[in-house]
Image (spheres, coloured by chain):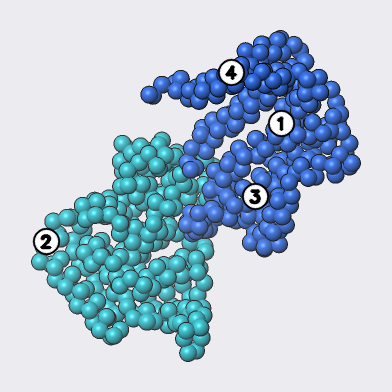
């Protein structure tokens, strides 16, 4: 049973049931797999399809980049200084507990329907997730390695950059993996509500539903799934390549 | 003139359980160690062996008294400290080479200089050591060696070892001890070795210091005048047995005083 194709078994089962179901019930919003594949193929050939993907990827990438840039240093500082943790950990925990989607109307009012609103909304949640994972990584860094470093009389900066940071890195990477998937979700949701701009997978999904192009809608859902899967796979690969000592 | 001078040091911990609100761990403890001498602290668990190493290294502050190494305070001395759980102090993200290079980097060498120095050092001892692998790819014994090499590569003025081989079986332990002695023979280093194995203590050291009691005091000092280099066959010699018995006797006396 050990074969490169074995993981596909689950997919085959689902598609099979889907096909049979669509054949039996015949309702407009449950198109057959063949129809959906047909829609997907005709979409792939259009420029619009790739523009939508690029728009969503761009927003996800920018949000993820900004969040990493803010979240990692923030987590490092809060994790490293006990006093900072005492002062801000509760706030961080509460802020993270507000569902980002609940803030959507607020960001809509503040920043409008364009890219900035979508990106800001995504950054809000993702930054906090990254900061929290980073903070926990730093706080749980090996005390023994740090103590060893101290016996060498090295500076606090040296100890932090050569020991604590690396000890926290596996946790930071877990945070990045969790948050890139979240970033994609939030960008798609934001695109559905903040319908500014021309392109975006979320917006397109919504429009296809309005036009009752159900097989097109399913094709778009599949596209989102593939995108999410690939993004996660890239981070997983990066982790196993460069943070091989974690887990 | 002694190299390491521990002069009248005291250490208390705050405790609610005691009548006067504190536990005295050390009280006016004094000891001196000569340059190049190998001294073993021998005593029961929890007799303050680790605490005294930490005080010598400056990891925990003294409440009274002074520690000087060659007239300087411990912070100004190049010191290598090997912890009991030495595998836990290795860096899994660094290759063996870079693990051993770490103290040199901490002393300000560039990565490149540090690596070159490590290569020179390890080649002189064991040129088959898998330097380019990561610690998790190595056997337990090899991991212990990384820690030992890492402690000695910087030519420390003072070497502190806290039961480094206590988790090894007899065979492995004696092998590590011989490697340690061989390296030290080439580069004489003032060493303090903490042990709770009587044979290890006698086999390695120039002087065994038996610690015991609360607060910790020196119960006895036993000089070890076995020939150098030490050989495994010495473990069976009459002279070795005699020294071991003396240490054991002093240890028992210490315990008797304790009770």
Q: Quadrant of residue A37?
A: top right
Q: What is the spatial separation of the Cα atoms under label 3 and label 2, in whole angstroms?
A: 59 Å
Horizontal placement of A126 versus A24: left or right?
right
B90 or B5, nearer to the observer:
B90
Location of residue A130 in the rendering, given as x and y in whole percent from the top left corner: 66, 44
Q: From this viewpoint, is residue A8 visible?
A: yes
Q: What is the spatial separation of the Cα atoms under label 4 and label 1, in whole angstroms?
A: 35 Å
Residue under label 2: B236
Horizontal placement of B193 versus A126: left or right?
left
Could you tell which of marks 1 and 3 lies nearer the N-terminus? 1
B203 or A244, nearer to the observer:
A244
Label at residue A19: 4
Location of residue B98 in the rendering, given as x and y in whole percent from the top left corner: 46, 42
Residue under label 1: A61
Q: Secondary structure at mark 3?
A: helix
Horizontal placement of A9 versus B244: left or right?
right
| Number of numbered discs visible in the structure rendering | 4
Kindly report which numbered mark, 3 or 2, lies closer to the viewer in this rendering. Answer: 3
Q: Is residue B115 placed above or below B3 in the rendered structure?
A: above
In the rendered image of the structure, the colour used to display chain B is: cyan
Residue under label 3: A132
In the rendered image of the structure, the colour used to display chain A is: blue
The residue at the point 48 percent across, 43 percent down is A247
Q: Residues within 10 Å of mark 2 (few under 14, many from 20)?
A: few
Q: What is the spatial separation of the Cα atoms under label 1 and label 3, in whole angstroms?
A: 20 Å
């Amino acid at each position: 049973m050990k074969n490169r194709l074995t993981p596909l078994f689950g997919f085959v089962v689902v598609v099979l049931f889907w096909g049979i179901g669509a054949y039996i019930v015949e309702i407009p919003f449950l198109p057959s797999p063949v129809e959906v594949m047909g829609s997907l193929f005709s979409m792939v050939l259009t420029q619009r399809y790739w523009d939508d993907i690029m728009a969503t990827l761009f927003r996800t990438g920018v949000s993820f980049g900004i969040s990493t840039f803010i979240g990692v240093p923030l987590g490092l500082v809060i994790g490293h200084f006990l006093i900072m943790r005492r002062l801000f950990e509760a706030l961080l925990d509460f802020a993270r507990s507000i569902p980002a989607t609940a803030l959507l109307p607020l960001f809509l009012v503040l920043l409008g329907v364009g890219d900035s609103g979508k990106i800001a909304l995504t950054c809000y949640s993702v930054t906090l997730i990254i900061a929290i994972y980073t903070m926990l990584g730093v706080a749980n860094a090996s005390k023994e390695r740090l103590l060893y470093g101290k016996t060498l009389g090295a500076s606090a900066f040296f100890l932090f950059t050569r020991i604590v940071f690396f000890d926290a890195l596996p946790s930071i990477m877990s945070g990045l993996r969790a948050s890139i998937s979240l970033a994609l979700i939030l960008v798609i949701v934001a695109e559905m509500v903040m319908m500014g701009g021309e392109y975006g997978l979320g917006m397109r999904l919504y429009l296809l539903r309005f036009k009752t192009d159900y097989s097109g809608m399913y094709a778009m859902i599949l596209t989102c799934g593939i995108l999410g899967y690939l993004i996660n796979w890239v981070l997983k690969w990066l982790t196993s390549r460069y943070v091989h000592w974690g887990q | 003139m002694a190299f390491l001078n521990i002069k009248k040091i005291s250490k208390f911990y705050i405790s609610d359980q005691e009548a006067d609100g504190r536990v005295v761990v050390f009280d006016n403890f004094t000891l001196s160690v000569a340059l190049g001498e190998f001294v073993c602290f021998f005593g029961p668990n929890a007799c303050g062996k680790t605490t005294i190493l930490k005080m010598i290294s400056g990891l925990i502050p003294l409440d009274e008294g002074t520690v000087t190494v060659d007239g300087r305070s411990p912070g100004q001395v190049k010191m290598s400290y090997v912890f009991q759980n030495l595998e836990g102090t290795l860096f899994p993200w660094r290759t063996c080479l870079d693990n051993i290079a770490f103290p040199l980097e901490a002393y300000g060498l560039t990565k490149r200089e540090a690596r070159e120095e490590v290569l020179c050092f390890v080649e002189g001892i064991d040129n088959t050591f898998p330097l380019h692998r990561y610690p998790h790819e190595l056997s337990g014994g090899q991991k212990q060696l990384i820690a030992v090499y890492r402690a000695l590569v910087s030519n420390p003025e003072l070497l502190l070892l806290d039961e480094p081989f206590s988790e090894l079986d007899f065979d492995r332990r004696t092998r590590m001890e011989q490697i340690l002695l061989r390296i030290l023979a080439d580069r004489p280093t003032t060493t303090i070795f903490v042990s709770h194995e009587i044979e290890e203590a006698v086999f390695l050291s120039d002087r065994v210091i038996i610690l015991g009691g609360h607060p910790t005091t020196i119960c006895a000092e036993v000089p070890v005048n076995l020939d150098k280099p030490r050989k495994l066959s010495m473990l069976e010699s009459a002279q070795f047995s005699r020294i071991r018995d003396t240490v054991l006797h002093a240890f028992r006396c210490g315990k008797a005083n304790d009770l």
